[in-house]
Image: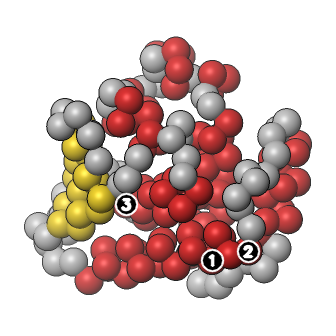
Amino acid sequence: MIITLKKMVNKPSILTIVRNDTTSTWSKLHRGLETHDLAHYAVESTLKFTKAFYGLINEGYTVADFELPKEQRPFALRPENLHPEAIITEHIVNMLEVELLNSGFNNKLIEELEVILKNNSFSIPENLNRNTLNIIRETYHKLYNQWLVLEDGQELNIKFMS
C-alpha cells in the first residue's frame, strides 16, 4: 500500500492511499490532520497492526467512510464494532500528538496507556514496550520532519507493508 500526503499551503492537503490491489481512496485533510495520519502509520507499521485505520483502508473501506457520522458509517467502522487494534491505535496516536504539541516525550506513556486501555476493557499489545515505543516515536518524528520541509504541492510518499 502507498500512502501519499500532498502538502497544500493555501488549501487543504490531500491524502491518497493506493491499496495493495491497486484501487485507491483519497480525501482533503483538515489542517493539522496530516500529523495524525503520520502517527497512525508509525503505530500501525511498528506494531504490525492490520485492523486499524490503514489496514481497514487496505480491506476496501474509504477515507470518506471514516468521515461519516458514526451512525452512518459501515457497520465494521462504527466505534462499538471496531477491532481492538483500531481503538488501541487511536489512543496511542492521540498520546503521540500530545507529546508533539508539548515538545517532549511522556516517560510514563506506556503506563498511562495501560490505565486508559484497562478502563476500556483492553490490554496493552504484547509487542508494545519501551523499544517499540521508541521506534514508533522515531518513525513519527522522522515523517513529521519530512512533512515540515515540504513546499506547496510537494508530496510525502510512504510504503506501508501489510
Q: Amino acid at mark 1?
A: Asn
Depicted 65 relative to depicted 95: above or below = above
On the rendered structure, is 36 left or right of 115? left
Along the line of sight, the residue nearer the viewer: 78 or 12: 78
Q: Which residue is located at x 84 percent, y 55 percent? A: 114
Secondary-structure class at tag 1 = helix
On the rendered structure, is 74 left or right of 34? right
Measured as percent of width and height from the top left, residue 148 is found at 32, 79
Q: Which residue is located at x 47 percent, y 78 percent? A: 141
Q: Amino acid at mark 2?
A: Arg
Distance, label 3 to label 1, CA atoms, is: 21 Å
Measured as percent of width and height from the top left, residue 41 is found at 45, 58
Q: Earlier in the sequence, mark 3 or mark 2?
A: 3
**The disc label shown at residue 134, or none:** 1
Question: Residues at badges 3 and 1 in contact (C-beta under 8 Å)?
Answer: no
Along the line of sight, the residue nearer the viewer: 18 or 90: 18
Q: Look at the image and tell me whether residue 13 can be seen.
A: no
**The disc label shown at residue 53, or none:** none
Question: Residues at badges 2 and 1 in contact (C-beta under 8 Å)?
Answer: yes
Distance, label 2 to label 1, CA atoms, is: 6 Å
Distance, label 3 to label 2, CA atoms, is: 25 Å
Measured as percent of width and height from the top left, residue 110 is found at 79, 65
Secondary-structure class at tag 2 = helix
Crowd band around label 3 with a 10 angstrom C-alpha radius: few (<14), some (14–19), many (20+): some
**The disc label shown at residue 34, or none:** 3
Q: Look at the image and tell me whether residue 134 can be seen.
A: yes
Residue designated by label 2: 130
